[in-house]
Image: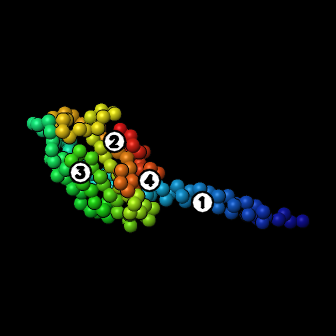
Amino acid sequence: MSAQKGFTLIELMIVVAIIGILAAVALPAYQNYTVKARVSEVILAASSCRSTITDIVQNSPVKDLGTALGSSCTITATKMVASGSASNAGVITVVGNETNMSGETDATHNAIDLTPMMSATTALVATTDGGKTIQGWKCGPAATNPMPNKYLPGSCQGTY
């Protein structure tokens, strides 16, 4: 008698089922990961504005910053960024280009706010905080057209 070699049909079916389950779990996680990487580029686009606003606030000889913050910067459109600007309160809003973010975001869910914080719980007050030091930035979905939290990097989910 000769010994039979190879895999049985049931063994092959089990392997195919395991691969199918792994693919079903891994694919959505990978898609979220790629969108998060693209959203990171959107947040990075605001870095020059953050530096400018920090400089204006810390080096201002007057307490009331008026419209200096609102006109301090604009963010140029790139592949992942549609637009961006700062408000008179120093809040930077960056709008992602929903077309280039793999279709995971849309025109009503593509904006991120970065808010200058004077402490862990107090945002910048542009009329009184000139000459003070910004302690950090709070990053999260914008008030208008908010980016879904699941696409924001861990450092940008409404944290200080």
Q: Which amino acid does label 4 sit on?
A: Pro
- For residue 14, above or below residue 158: below
In the picture of the structure, the residue carrying the numbered disc 4 is: 148
Lower position in the chain sequence, tag 4 or tag 3: 3
Q: Could you tell me if the residues under marks 4 and 1 are in contact, i.e. CB atoms within 8 Å?
A: no
Q: Which amino acid does label 3 sit on?
A: Ala
Q: Distance between the residues labelled 2 and 1?
A: 36 Å
In the picture of the structure, the residue carrying the numbered disc 1 is: 23
Q: Could you tell me if the residues under marks 3 and 2 are in contact, i.e. CB atoms within 8 Å?
A: no
- Name the residue rendered at 31%, 46% in the picture: 114
> Considering the numbered disc 2 on the image, is that residue within a helix, a strand or a loop?
strand
- Name the residue rendered at 55%, 59% in the picture: 27
- For residue 16, above or below residue 71: below
Q: Which amino acid does label 2 sit on?
A: Lys
Q: Which residue in the rendered view is the most extreme toward the right?
A: 1
Viewer can see residue 142: yes
Expressed as whole percent of the image width and height from the top left, the position of residue 17 reads 69, 61
Q: What residue type is labelled 1?
A: Ala
Q: How far apart are marks 1 and 3 (CA)?
A: 42 Å
Lower position in the chain sequence, tag 4 or tag 1: 1
> Considering the numbered disc 4 on the image, is that residue within a helix, a strand or a loop?
loop
Q: Distance between the residues labelled 2 and 4?
A: 16 Å
> Considering the numbered disc 1 on the image, is that residue within a helix, a strand or a loop?
helix
Q: Residues within 10 Å of mark 4 (few under 14, many from 20)?
A: some
Expressed as whole percent of the image width and height from the top left, the position of residue 93 reads 29, 52
Q: Distance between the residues labelled 4 and 3?
A: 21 Å
Tag shown at residue 138: 2
Lower position in the chain sequence, tag 1 or tag 3: 1
